[in-house]
Image (cartoon, grey):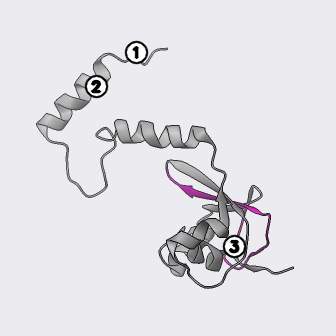
Amino acid sequence: METVRIDKWLWAVRVYKTRTIAAEACKKGRVYVDNNSVKPARMIKIGDVVQVKKPPVTYSFKVKDISQKRMGAKLVPDFMENVTPAEEYEILEMNKISGFVDRQRGTGRPTKKDRRDMEQFTENLDFDE
């Protein structure tokens, strides 16, 4: 049975832009195979389910084929199947809708307008429930 390193496969199927970033994600515990955290050198085979945490969503991919070389985006569906649950995409959509509440690192302090927008947004919410 053919196998390949997980960091190389994640780079080849365009989950991560570089192999170095894929290896770092594995080292930081953001990549799982069959619900077990893996190291970059872990060998994967056809049929494995790879889970990748990219906050706030955890994506799940089923390995359909093995490749060690980076491919064009049109060829990716031949090598993996996206099996991410719909609930994860709902979390992503909710995060996009309420995106102004979560500030990006390095953007500085909120402006007065940002503060007013946040207060208006949270005014109708009851946090005691």
> Relative to 110, does residue 11 appear above or below in the rendering?
below
Q: Please state which amino acid type lies under the numbered disc 3.
A: Lys
**Disc 2 residue type (three-letter):** Phe
Furthest-right residue in this view: 1
* Residue 121: quadrant of the picture: top left
Q: In which quarter of the image is the N terminus?
A: bottom right
**Residue 48 forms part of the magenta stretch:** yes
Q: Give the range drawn in magenta.
A: 37-55
Identify the image quadrant of residue 117.
top left
Q: Is residue 96 left or right of residue 26?
A: left
Number of labelled discs?
Answer: 3
The residue nearer to you, when weighing 101 against 11, is 11
Residue at x 56%, y 76% (from the top left corner): 11
For image coordinates 54% across by 67% down, the residue present is: 15
Q: Nearer the viewer, mark 1 or mark 2?
A: 2
Count neighbours of disc 1 (C-alpha within 10 A) and say few if under 14, some if 14 to 19, many if 20 or more. Answer: few
